[in-house]
Structures are given as structure tokens and as C-alpha cells.
Amino acid sequence: MYKVEATVTTFTPTELKLTADWPRAWLQAQRSTTIERKLYPGEPWDAPAEPVQRSEIGGYLRRNHPDLQLGDRVIVGCY
């Protein structure tokens, strides 16, 4: 499992998408994610110490995360 900092980059009435530097091994495997929490302004977070690939992933239902807005930084659990 990885913990990754992601940014809300697509915000529609029904869907959220996140952009981050995702671990390559995780992207290539069967993957699932959970948005764990919103980061506080200025809160630091370290990137995974392995090869990463910047990309956008989506499929989060906005109704499950009503407190998130475009540009918010979140911690995502990657399984």
C-alpha cells in the first residue's frame, strides 16, 4: 500500500478526478484507491521513494466527498 498526495483536478457535478505522481508499480497492477483525508494548507507530504508517473485518475463519486473542491490536496491510499 502507498499513501500519495493528489490534487483534485476535475470537479463535475457527479465526479472527481485526481492528479498525482502515482507509483508506477501500482499503476501497472490491479489498483484501488481510497481518499483518506484533505491536507491542511501548507501541510507537507513526501512522495513515494520509488519511480512514479504523473497522471489523472478518476471515478470518485462527488457525493461521497462533498467537502472537496477543485484544487484541494488530499491523501490517497493506494492498494
Image (cartoon, rainbow, N blue to C red):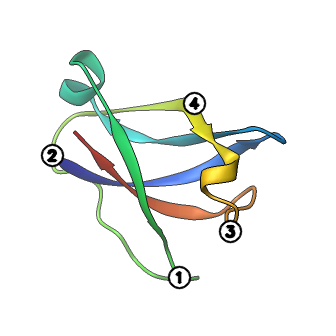
Q: Quadrant of the C terminus?
A: top left
Disc 2 vs disc 3: which is toward the camera?
Answer: 3
Q: Quadrant of residue 66?
A: bottom right
Residue under label 2: 1
* Circle nearer the N terminus (3, 4): 4
Residue at mark 2 to residue at mark 4: CA–CA distance: 19 Å
Name the spot of residue 33 as percent of width and height, x first. Answer: 36, 41
Name the spot of residue 63 as percent of width and height, x first. Answer: 69, 51
Q: Quadrant of residue 72?
A: bottom right
**Amino acid at circle 4:** Gly
**Amino acid at circle 3:** Asp
Left/right placement of residue 68 relative to residue 75 reads: right
Left/right placement of residue 40 relative to residue 67 reads: left
As helix, strand or loop, the secondary structure at mark 2 comes to loop
User: In the drawing, what numbered circle is on residue 40?
Assistant: 1
Residue at mark 2 to residue at mark 3: CA–CA distance: 25 Å
**Amino acid at circle 2:** Met
Residue at mark 3 to residue at mark 4: CA–CA distance: 17 Å
Residue under label 3: 67
* Circle nearer the N terminus (2, 3): 2
**Amino acid at circle 1:** Tyr
Residue under label 4: 59
Crowding at mark 1 (Cα within 10 Å: few <14, some 14-19, many 20+): few
Residue at mark 1 to residue at mark 2: CA–CA distance: 22 Å
Q: Quadrant of residue 14?
A: top right
Q: Residue at x 29, y 56 (%)?
A: 47
Q: Residue at x 70, y 58 (%)?
A: 71
* Circle nearer the N terminus (1, 2): 2
